[in-house]
Image (spheres, rainbow, N blue to C red):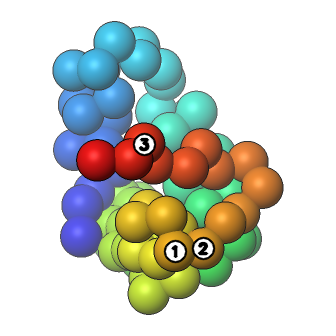
Amino acid sequence: EANESILQDCLDAYGHNVSRDVVRGQIDWLAEQNLVTVENLSGFYVVTITGRGQDVAEGRAKVSGVKRPRAR
């Protein structure tokens, strides 16, 4: 579980300097794919990964538009 501000900070740390609008757009897309759930708390998004999202993140499932993880 993370809020949009934490996600934006993580993106910044990896060199992805994007606006809050872009972060929200990406969160909305992930929710449409059933990869995360979104709760709007007083105008702030709180995002939680779903079981399907975890499967995609760990390479057990594929979703077009989501890069597969590298082999370890």
Disc 2 on helix, strand or loop? loop
Q: Residues within 10 Å of mark 2 (few under 14, many from 20)?
A: few
Query: In the image, what residue type sits under mark 1?
Result: Arg
Q: Quadrant of the N terminus?
A: bottom left
Disc 2 to disc 1, how far (Cα)? 4 Å
Disc 3 on helix, strand or loop? loop
Residue 63, above or below 69: below
What residue would you read off at disc 2?
Answer: 61
Disc 1 on helix, strand or loop? loop
Residue 41: image quadrant is bottom left
Query: In the image, what residue type sits under mark 3?
Result: Arg
Question: Percent from the top left, x then y, of residue 53?
Answer: 49, 73
Q: Earlier in the sequence, mark 2 or mark 3?
A: 2
Mark 2–mark 1 contact, CB under 8 Å?
yes
What residue would you read off at disc 1?
Answer: 60
Question: Percent from the top left, x then y, of residue 72?
Answer: 28, 47
Question: Percent from the top left, x then y, of residue 32?
Answer: 71, 71
Tell me what residue is drawn at x 78 percent, y 55 percent: 64
Mark 2–mark 3 contact, CB under 8 Å?
no
Quick one: which residue is furthest to the bottom in this view? 51
- Asked whether residue 42 is in view, the answer is no
What residue would you read off at disc 3?
Answer: 70
Residue 12: image quadrant is top left
Tell me what residue is drawn at x 67 percent, y 66 percent: 62
